[in-house]
Amino acid sequence: MRVMRASGLLGLLLCVPLVAGASVPAIDLETGSLGGRAFHTYTLDEATDLLGRPSTVTSPLEIDGRRFGARLKYHALGLSLSFAHPGDDAARHCGSMDVYLTRQWDDKAAVWYSAFTGEIHPAVTCEWKADRVLDVFGTARASDLFDQEEYDECVELEAALVASGVRDGSGRPMSSTVTAVLLRTDTHNVRFEYEYNTRFIDRLSIFVPMSHKDQ
């Protein structure tokens, strides 16, 4: 197996080839579970025992006093998991999990994410639109985060960053923070990110909000 280490702040480790033949555990959006267990109860070691070796690893880092834990990317599975910084949590529990419903380009690793092929409950797919998410989960718990003014600001900022060379225009758009439906539960939140024009769901982000972490 060939291993390439990239220099720079992120300390990215790229393992080639990508994960192959790995089993795909089921995801339950209502309970926030991965393989029948709440995603945030997995430590980094337990997650890799379940999923195998990731295709890329971003090491923990600290920027301006803010700590960021390791991020494991499973491009072939359509999954990405982020963990607590070891200085905050020695066991490094999972704090968020991204699920890709469509094939998407990872500009940092220069690798494609495959679409997730495992079971999702309820059975959300890339054929769902934002309105269907609202219908299924109910507006008492789910809300559309879209705001035209915020969207326009994100688009303008991203265009400026691309023009200056800071961003290359590929990968996840900055506007994805507002082109999303947010589902709130007692234990976790789920963000359903959608394409601006068609409102089809592209990506899910399951995370424990800051307000829940001390409970």
Image (cartoon, helix red, strand yellow):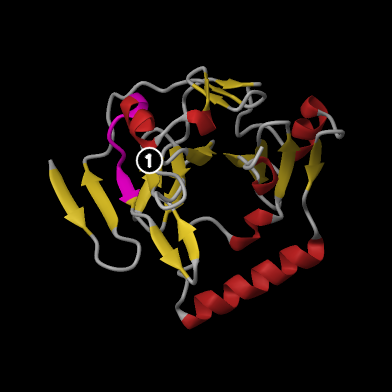
Q: Is residue 111 left or right of residue 195?
A: left
Residue with the mark numbered 1: 75
Q: Residue 163, percent across and down?
A: 52, 80
Q: Residue 67, percent across and down?
A: 47, 59
Compared to residue 114, the image places residue 195 above or below, namely below
Compared to residue 6, the image places residue 89 above or below, namely above
Going 80% across and 62% down the picture, which residue do you hit?
148
Q: Confirm whether the magenta stretch covers residue 68.
A: no
Q: Quadrant of the N terminus?
A: top left
Q: Confirm whether the magenta stretch covers residue 55.
A: yes
Compared to residue 69, the image places residue 79 above or below, namely above
Q: Residue 80, percent across and down?
A: 44, 41
198 vs 30, nearest the viewer? 30
Residue 113 picture quarter: top left
In this picture, which residue range is highlighted in magenta? 50-57
Going 70% across and 46% down the picture, which residue do you hit?
211
